[in-house]
């Protein structure tokens, strides 16, 4: 943990709303995004937290809502997917989904051809393009270069976001902070104090939104520079802290 960040205190009562990143926060990262799995214990923990908070719990993730449902089945969570490009505001709502534009599809094909199949993993998520290099870290500089070069040929409104083990191309409106604010405007979140846990660069926008709302921001494995107020060492400590709130 960064020496500048203390572990978060026990917080959760009926007055709090809880927002959770998935990969690196609730689940350990894997070389391939499809290689992770959710335990029955984690499903049970999330159900108990959701019940304690009267439903004011949502996952805010770069994964699609469909993938969230697959991972956590049969549990159906309130969720913002693709950094807020997709939403399911209530468990029984339809998903507001995002399709893949032709120019992003073509770019994904080009990058996959350049980097080679089976090394970097190219994840196509509608308007979001993610290049995962955890299994081939030597490819990260070239992956980042390719995505940055592509900005010149794409319509305005995209940005490049580096991560712990990869790089992503996102629309400007794909922001975890905006997703959190959308949930906070509706029941059962409205009027509560937000808490957000995340572990990577795209989560920083969420930390800033939560800080602005007078909430609590918690980064897992915090780097030297982060907007988060508190830190936790890793996924195991995160799950332990969440259990302590029950």
Image: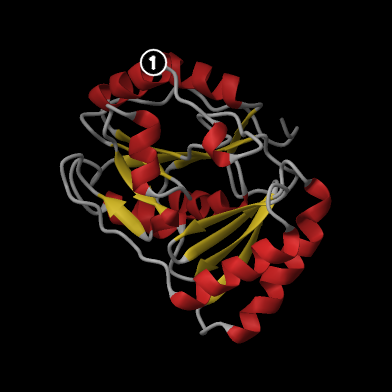
Q: Nearer the viewer, residue 109 or 74?
A: 109
Q: Which residue is depicted at the point 68% across and 39% down?
A: 222
Q: Is 222 left or right of 145, judged from the image as shown?
A: left
Quadrant assignment, res 50: top left
* Residue 200 in the image, given as x and y percentages of width and height: 61, 46
Q: Is 187 left or right of 16, judged from the image as shown?
A: left
* Residue 172 in the image, given as x and y percentages of width and height: 49, 71
Residue occupied by mark 1: 40
Q: Is residue 7 above or below residue 89?
A: above
Quadrant assignment, res 221: top right
Q: What element carries label 1?
A: helix
- Specify whether residue 18 is in view: no
Q: How many marks?
A: 1
Q: Is residue 136 above or below residue 115?
A: above
Colouring method of the image: secondary structure
Q: Is 112 left or right of 208, judged from the image as shown?
A: right
* Residue 242 in the image, given as x and y percentages of width and height: 45, 21
Q: Nearer the viewer, residue 12 or 132?
A: 132
Q: Which residue is depicted at the point 24% across and 45% down?
A: 191
* Residue 113 in the image, given as x and y percentages of width and height: 69, 64
Q: Nearer the viewer, residue 145 or 52?
A: 145
| Quarter of the image that includes the C terminus | top left
Q: Which residue is depicted at the point 57% across and 52% down?
A: 204
């Amino acid at each position: 943990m960064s020496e500048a960040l203390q572990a978060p205190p026990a917080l959760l009562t009926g007055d709090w709303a809880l927002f959770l990143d998935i990969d690196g926060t609730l689940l350990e990262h894997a070389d391939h995004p499809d290689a992770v799995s959710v335990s029955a214990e984690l499903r049970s923990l999330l159900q108990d937290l959701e019940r304690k908070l009267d439903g004011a719990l949502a996952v805010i993730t770069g994964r699609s809502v469909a993938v969230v449902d697959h991972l956590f089945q049969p549990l159906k969570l309130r969720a913002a997917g693709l950094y807020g490009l997709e939403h399911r505001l209530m468990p029984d709502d339809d998903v507001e989904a995002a399709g893949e534009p032709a120019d992003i599809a073509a770019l994904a094909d080009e990058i996959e051809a350049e980097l080679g199949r089976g090394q970097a993993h190219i994840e196509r998520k509608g308007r979001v393009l993610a290049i995962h290099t955890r299994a081939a870290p030597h490819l990260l500089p070239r992956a980042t270069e390719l995505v940055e070069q592509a900005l010149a040929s794409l319509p305005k409104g995209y940005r490049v976001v580096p991560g712990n083990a990869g790089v992503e191309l996102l629309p400007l409106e794909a922001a975890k902070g905006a997703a959190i604010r959308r949930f906070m405007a509706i029941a059962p979140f409205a009027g509560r104090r937000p808490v957000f846990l995340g572990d990577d660069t795209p989560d920083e926008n969420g930390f800033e939104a939560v800080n602005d709302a007078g909430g609590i921001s918690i980064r897992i494995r915090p780097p030297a520079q982060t907007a988060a107020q508190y830190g936790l060492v890793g996924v195991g400590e995160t799950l332990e802290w969440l259990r302590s709130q029950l």
